[in-house]
Amino acid sequence: MIVGPSALVPTCRAGALLAAVFVAVSPLAGQSNDSRPATPRTEASKVSKSARWSADVESKAGLQYDHNVFLLSSAQRAALGSPSSEVSASGRYESMESANDMLAIGNIGLEVKGPGVGGRTLEISPSLSYEFASRNELRREAAAALSIAQSLGGGRRVRFRAEAAPNHFSRNYLEDAFDADADGSISPAERIYTKGEYADYSVGGDLRLPLGRTRKTSLAVATAGLGYYARSYNTPFAVRDLAGPTAALSLDVAPRAPLGLELTYELAALSANAGRQVVLLDEAVYNVDFNGNGTATDLEARAVVDVDRSRLEHQLGGAVTFGAGKKLAATLGYDYRLRSFRSELPYDENGAGRRDRRNGVRGSIRSRVSRSLTISAGARFRSQTTNR
């Protein structure tokens, strides 16, 4: 359950457009790849006492085009495409081949079912996934997940879930700077960038409860969960590490099969250890001689200051699913995320008073070709503004 960390006029970062086509195949069980059923169904509360354990395999494969894989601004995208000699010398875009990329995504999972507590169904589902980026080699990565779900009867279920992505390349970050010409200001060629990589880990659990009943189905399903998330960067950027509790609520409403509504809310309180980092500051703004050359007027001077990337995240989402028979469904969704950074450090321009707001829209079409084959295609656009 991964949930996910001044100027007064907000500036807009480039939107990210993502389009994907996925195929799900369940050769043994014939399960579909539906993210949610058109109508929430009540699962079998118990299995036979003589029932044996069974195992099903599900595999997914897909192609995904990402317009802004490194989440760059418009100016940064242009610089990546045609960097100056000074920028190239700094290593800012080293190994970042392209702002857009085509990703081949594969996932294989195992679902083991059998009698659990009280004879009710217990499901254990480990899975492995891999993303192969065609243009940016450092964006190729693997992830693993484990889900253990225990039926409580009457459509109720409790679940534990853990996820791990041990190596993700974000982008290159400023590690240090050297004022080679001793003019007090750091030019692009005097900056030193190093690749920023991190590992993601999360654990959590949730409880699913049906609300309202008809003869065969639930009118709605509510799910509430709690978890813990941790992100750990490579050594030069340990001050970017984040960890903290998460929470999520969702309500899945399907009054009748052709139409369904899902509402979600996610919260993450992520803390970072405040630490010292090399940044570039305009001395005149603070009237401080950061680089120790006897003046306090240098622009983009090298400074080593305390930073704190702790933040509080809220995310709201909604999606409407339209069904056309049992084999075709379309989904339209919207999400909004607010990040409030909690730093109060005097020279922390990145975090003090910062607010990020992100809006996203998405749509997809899903077709169940057969009992063992589902095809889906969709697109998503996200745009973020920040008061930096």
Image (cartoon, grey):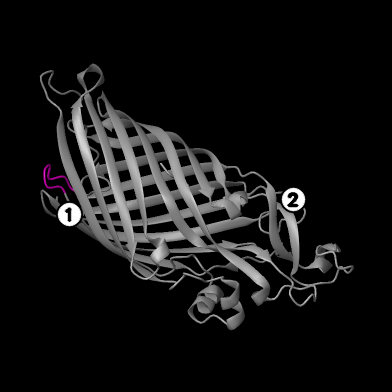
Give me the disc on residue 374.
1
Alpha-carbon distance for marks 1 and 2?
A: 51 Å
Which residue is rendered at x = 49% and y = 52% of the image? 198
Q: Nearer the viewer, residue 102 or 44?
A: 102
Report the side of 299 relative to 87 (left or right): right
Report the side of 275 relative to 234 (left or right): right
Residue that carries the numbered disc 2 in the rendered image: 345
Report the side of 323 relative to 348 (left or right): left
Snapshot quadrant of residue 322: bottom left
Q: Which of 278 and 2 is in front in this view?
A: 278
Q: Which of 219 and 288 is in front in this view?
A: 288
Q: Give the range drawn in magenta.
A: 26-32
Which residue is rendered at x = 56% and y = 71% of the image? 91
Query: Mark 1 is on which residue type?
Result: Thr
- Counting from the top left corner in percent of width and height, residue 179 is at 74, 72
- Counting from the top left corner in percent of width and height, residue 265 is at 45, 44
Taking the view exactly as shown, the residue that stands out farthest to the right is 294
Task: Check if residue 343 falls in the magenta segment.
Answer: no
Dominant SS in magenta: loop
Query: Mark 2 is on which residue type?
Result: Leu
Asked if marks 1 and 2 touch (Cβ < 8 Å), the reply is no
